[in-house]
Amino acid sequence: MGLQDLIVTPVYLLFFYALAYWIRPRVTNRDTRKYFIPGLTVKFIGAISLGLIYQFYYRGGDTLNYYNWGASIVWEAFLDSPLKAVSLILAGQEYPNDAFDYASRIIFFGDLPSYSIVRVAGLLSIFTVNSYYAISVCFGAISFAGTWALFYALYKYCTPIVQKTAIAVLFIPSVFFWGSGILKDTITFSALGFFIYSLLELVKWKKVMALNFIILFFSSYLLYHIKIYISLSLIPGAVLFVYIFYFSRAVKNMVLKILLTPILLIGVIYSMYFAALKLGEDNRKYSLDAMIETARVSAEWLYHVSRVEGGSGYSLGDDDFSPPGLVRKFVPGVWVSLFRPYLWEVRNPVMLLTAVESLALFGLFVFTLFKIGVISFFGDILSDPLISFLLLFTIVFCFAIGVSTFNFGSLARYRIPVIPLFAYSLFFVQFERQNSKR
């Protein structure tokens, strides 16, 4: 932490709070207003805490690498020549001739998903005098924008559970911790929030406006280019949402809906498979075979590092990543992403936070099943288009990260897109069942 952090960071905090108080009347109502400033505050707490823990506890890590070997180099280039900084921010996969001496020092150059974070952090470094914590606060503000869009969209969908929606979306500790600092997860979580917001505005509320299409396109673009597996996990759920939404309006018979929905689900899964095949034709890196091989290599490497360093590795039983092997890993992969680590698997204080949250999430899940009943639970899910979308995305995404991570530390960060959506889905189903009884 340098002198510029102590001077510039408070200035940016004051600026964002002033901006928040000015914006609040325009983006809140009587129900949501009280959550706006606290929601922003926990984002700032998460952003600053992330930096402090990586700086003084881990002594390094991705967030500091984006700063030291990315944003700081853009800042140096800016001091040399503003045009060189612009060249670095706009650079593709080839080194810019006028800024080669700086670009060659950026360790993320050529890795477009990671370099996207360097672009944002580098641009912000120019306006924050290269203060790490001021840049982090800006990332926290970016995260809050998408998070509030997600919260408002889900609140609007079911207004009576506003308090539970706020808890699920705004105040889960691991989400605002891992989703607020200088990391890919901050940008992708914000983009996910805007994606769901714009999709609901267009489909549910029929607000066919240019702005909503722009938000949907830009958020999809960010998810595709920074973490493509989030995009692939969203495809089946988003298509299912549109199908069920219009299908449920046309068919009023509940029994017929339950019988025909699995047929639609099979069609959606096939469309996802077809989309993945076409994607692989255009780019071999994202073919099904390549993604399976990448998952296998990533899982083995992370598990090996965890074992060697005495870290928080886990196993799903065997090393078989063939299609039959992946089918066997489906349930364990989803389970580990949602409900592990267990308390007896904790190896460090940060992991304890994840374990407590996993236990609370498991308790909420079991409570919902017992309160509603297994058959009624799945019936309620299939009868609502949004909940079908959110839970299908949760299952597909959890499977993808569960079978390719094999490290609880990384898993805690990767899973933040689905934890709020899963918790909200459980709260929603509880309310709907209680409301139907009334």
Image (spheres, grey):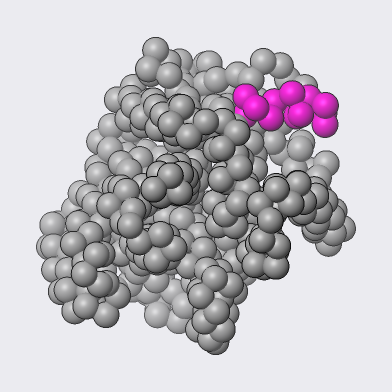
Q: Where does residue 407 sit, x and y in percent of width and height?
A: 52, 27
Q: Dominant secondary structure of the magenta stretch?
A: helix
Q: Is residue 125 above or below residue 331?
A: below
Span shown in magenta:
321-333
Q: Where does residue 400 sit, x and y in percent of width and height?
A: 64, 39
Q: Can residue 321 be seen at all in this image of the molecule?
A: no
Q: Residue furthest bottom?
A: 210
Q: Residue at x 62, y 24 (%)?
A: 332
Instruction: Please tell me which residue lies in front, 117 or 312.
Output: 312
Quadrant in the rendering for residue 133:
bottom left
Quadrant in the rendering for residue 73:
bottom left
Quadrant in the rendering for residue 136:
bottom left
Asked whether, in this view, residue 255 is left or right of residue 108, the answer is right
Instruction: Please tell me which residue lies in front, 152 or 58.
Output: 152
Q: Is residue 9 above or below residue 267?
A: below
Q: Residue at x 58, y 60 (%)?
A: 223
Q: Residue at x 59, y 57 (%)?
A: 385
Q: Is residue 249 above or below residue 6?
A: below
Q: Where does residue 427 sit, x and y in percent of width and height?
A: 40, 44
Q: Is residue 314 above or below residue 198?
A: above
Residue 109 inside the magenta-drawn segment: no
